[in-house]
């Protein structure tokens, strides 16, 4: 990769909704990168906290939306705006507004993508800003019950210093290949927010593409800056709804039947978990909406997918289930 190439190799798209508290440090960190072959585009989702004025006052390129389109709609608007240009960069990097990237972040992601043409996306090492020795996200995994989880969350970063294959890139800090986005389609805007990144990478895997974790691309993450907390009614309702849609869209009927005991057990565990946290009604509302509005989402054309692809994804779901059990067993015994 030519570090001095004036032609942008990537556009960093940052969705923002009332993120004025985080934007200055986010933009400042991007301005200190070891390469300059990228550009920044902040997608402004109708903030009311002065974000737009600050961005314009500091010369940061902005795409202004008239209303909050959520994460999925916001980043899609940004990607479409980049696609509409005469010269389209080969990559798009998605970045949450509540992040501070390290200087090698962009360079490491670009180098990872250029080493392997099979890669659809590469996920960065996300660190907890409160303690950068601990992982926030090292790529995302899926389980047989349909639970998505952040690899390595609240574990020492030393366990995750090696790159590896992951089920999905975390859309909070990841790079995607523009060419392959033409084939997979963009993020599903019916999700609005949560699990849309898992959905996109699942579709990519069904098309035969790969996803990788790159520990050399590091970013500090505050976490839940937009939604306000790890568990709240808004997040629980959308996540519960999108969990149903995620499984329905990306698995044929025979696999849904095969996984039904896992899915049923998973729903029961989640119901008890959120009831204990006083969030049973948002969970129930979201789950009911997901089950009763399957017609809102578009399923994959499974007849076009080679059977071997389902087997390879099944293997990842089994490994993800084992990893999930290991992670929470260790926390329970700590």
Image (tube, rainbow, N blue to C red):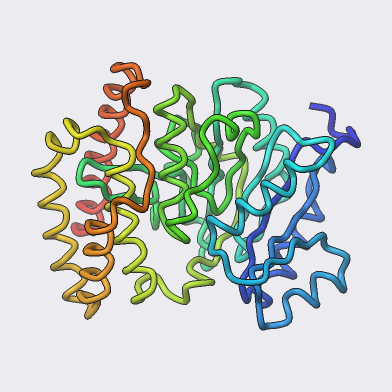
| Residue found at the far bottom of this picture | 49
Q: Quadrant of residue 316?
A: top left
Q: Is residue 17 left or right of residue 147?
A: right
Q: Name the residue: 53% across, 72% down.
A: 226
Q: Is residue 93 left or right of residue 153?
A: right
- Residue 220 % position (x, y): 59, 58
Q: Is residue 112 left or right of residue 254?
A: right
Image quarter of the C terminus:
bottom left
Q: Is residue 304 left or right of residue 135?
A: left
Q: Name the residue: 56% across, 36% down.
A: 122
Question: On screen, 18 above or below 331?
Answer: below
Q: Name the residue: 33% across, 42% down.
A: 249
- Residue 130 % position (x, y): 52, 68
Q: Quadrant of residue 11?
A: top right
- Residue 277 % position (x, y): 23, 77
Q: Nearer the viewer, residue 82 or 119?
A: 82
Question: On screen, 18 above or below 129?
Answer: below
Image quarter of the N terminus:
top right
Q: Name the residue: 44% across, 40% down.
A: 168
Question: On screen, 257 above or below 22?
Answer: above
Q: Nearer the viewer, residue 313 or 230?
A: 313
Question: On screen, 270 above or below 66?
Answer: above
Q: Nearer the viewer, residue 105 or 240?
A: 240
| Residue found at the far front of this picture | 295
- Residue 244 % position (x, y): 27, 52
Q: How many marks?
A: 0
């Amino acid at each position: 990769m030519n570090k001095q190439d004036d032609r942008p190799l990537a556009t960093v798209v940052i969705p923002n909704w009332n993120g004025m508290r985080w934007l200055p440090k986010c933009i400042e960190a991007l301005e200190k990168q070891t390469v300059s072959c990228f550009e920044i585009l902040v997608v402004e989702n109708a903030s009311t906290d002065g974000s737009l004025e600050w961005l314009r006052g500091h010369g940061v390129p902005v795409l202004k939306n008239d209303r909050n389109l959520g994460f999925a709609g916001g980043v899609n608007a940004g990607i479409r705006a980049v696609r509409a240009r005469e010269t389209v960069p080969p990559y798009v990097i998605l970045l949450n507004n509540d992040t501070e990237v390290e200087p090698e972040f962009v360079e490491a992601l670009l180098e990872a993508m250029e080493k392997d043409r099979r890669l659809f996306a590469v996920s960065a090492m996300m660190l907890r800003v409160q303690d950068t020795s601990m992982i926030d996200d090292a790529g995302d995994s899926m389980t047989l019950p349909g639970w998505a989880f952040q690899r390595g969350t609240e574990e020492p970063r030393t366990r995750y210093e090696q790159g590896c294959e992951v089920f999905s890139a975390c859309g909070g800090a990841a790079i995607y290949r523009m060419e392959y986005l033409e084939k997979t389609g963009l993020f599903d805007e019916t999700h609005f927010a949560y699990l849309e990144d898992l959905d996109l990478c699942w579709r990519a895997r069904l098309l035969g593409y790969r996803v990788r974790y790159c520990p050399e691309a590091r970013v500090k993450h505050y976490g839940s800056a937009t939604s306000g907390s790890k568990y709240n009614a808004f997040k629980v309702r959308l996540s519960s709804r999108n969990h149903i849609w995620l499984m329905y869209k990306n698995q044929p009927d025979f696999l849904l039947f095969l996984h039904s005991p896992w899915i049923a057990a998973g729903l029961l565990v989640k119901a008890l978990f959120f009831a204990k946290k006083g969030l049973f009604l948002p969970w129930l509302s979201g789950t009911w909406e997901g089950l009763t509005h399957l017609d809102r989402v578009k399923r994959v054309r499974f007849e076009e997918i080679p059977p071997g692809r389902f087997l390879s994804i099944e293997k990842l779901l089994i490994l993800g289930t084992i990893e999930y059990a290991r992670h929470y067993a260790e926390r329970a015994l700590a």
